[in-house]
Amino acid sequence: CLILAGTLLYWSVSYFYVGRLVVRLVIRNIPSSLMVTGRQDQSIEIRIRGPESIITKLAALNLLYTIDLSGAKAGPNKICFARDHFPIPDGISIEEIYGHETVIFLEKSEIKTLPLQVALTGKPAFGYEAGIVTAKPGSVVFKGPKKIMEKLAEIDTSRVDVTGLSEPVTRTVSLELP
């Protein structure tokens, strides 16, 4: 009886393995009038216990923890991680959640159509001057935090160098975002 108990104890201790997993955080159902601002946690680490073969397979997967913000309000939203929301199969237990909560900041958003302003640098060839500069499209639709969007009247392009030019040119440029 003592030998059997020792064998069962050895089997139960050697059968289970403790490992750490990084679980990526995914935000869903952000209310349409709001947007996430600021720096957000991208993942959370958990310590799990279970059969080594299953833990090894889990470590190779891209596990996701979904944060549902459907009822969230503007401002800081504290999210507490619930053990039963982690995508962990039966036979695996979560021993510890490192960083049991996160804060997600939401701000009111605004959609605005803004004209593009082409920014020039340099001087054309001698005897020439920069003529009418147009952007195609002439405007873009932006969605951003309301407090930033209220201050914007136009969006600048990255600088277009006209140094030494003596004929019309077409350039593809990026936008200088606030």
Image: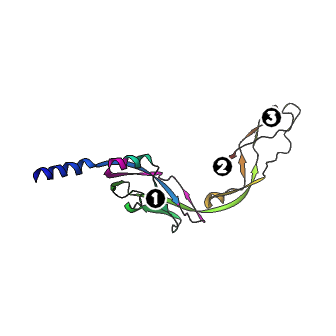
- Quadrant in which residue 92 is drawn: bottom left
Category of crowding for the residue at label 1, using alpha-carbon neighbours closer than 10 angstroms: few (below 14), some (14–19), many (at least 20): some
Tell me the element at label 2.
loop
What residue type is disc 3 on?
Lys
Query: Where does the magenta region start and end?
Result: 28-55
x, y percent for residue 28 = 53, 61
Quarter that holds the N terminus = bottom left
Residue at image point 79% right, 33% down? 163
Question: Cα distance, mark 3 to mark 2?
Answer: 25 Å
Asked where in the image residue 81 lies, by quadrant, the reply is: bottom left
Is residue 32 depicted above or below 61 in this figure? Answer: below
In this rendering, would 46 be left or right of 174? left
Quick check: is 63 in the magenta stretch? no
Q: CA distance from mark 2 to mark 1?
A: 26 Å
Residue 33 at x, y = what percent? 60, 66
> Residue 34 magenta-drawn?
yes
Kindly identify which residue carries mark 3.
Answer: 123
Picture colour scheme: rainbow
The circle drawn on residue 177 is 2
Q: In the rendered structure, which disc, 2 or 1, sits on the residue that comes first in sequence?
A: 1
Residue at 44 percent across and 61 percent down: it is 79
Is residue 112 rendered to the left or right of residue 136? left
Q: Residues within 10 Å of mark 2 (few under 14, many from 20)?
A: few
Residue kind at label 2, given as amino acid type: Leu
Mark 3 vs mark 2: which is more N-terminal? 3
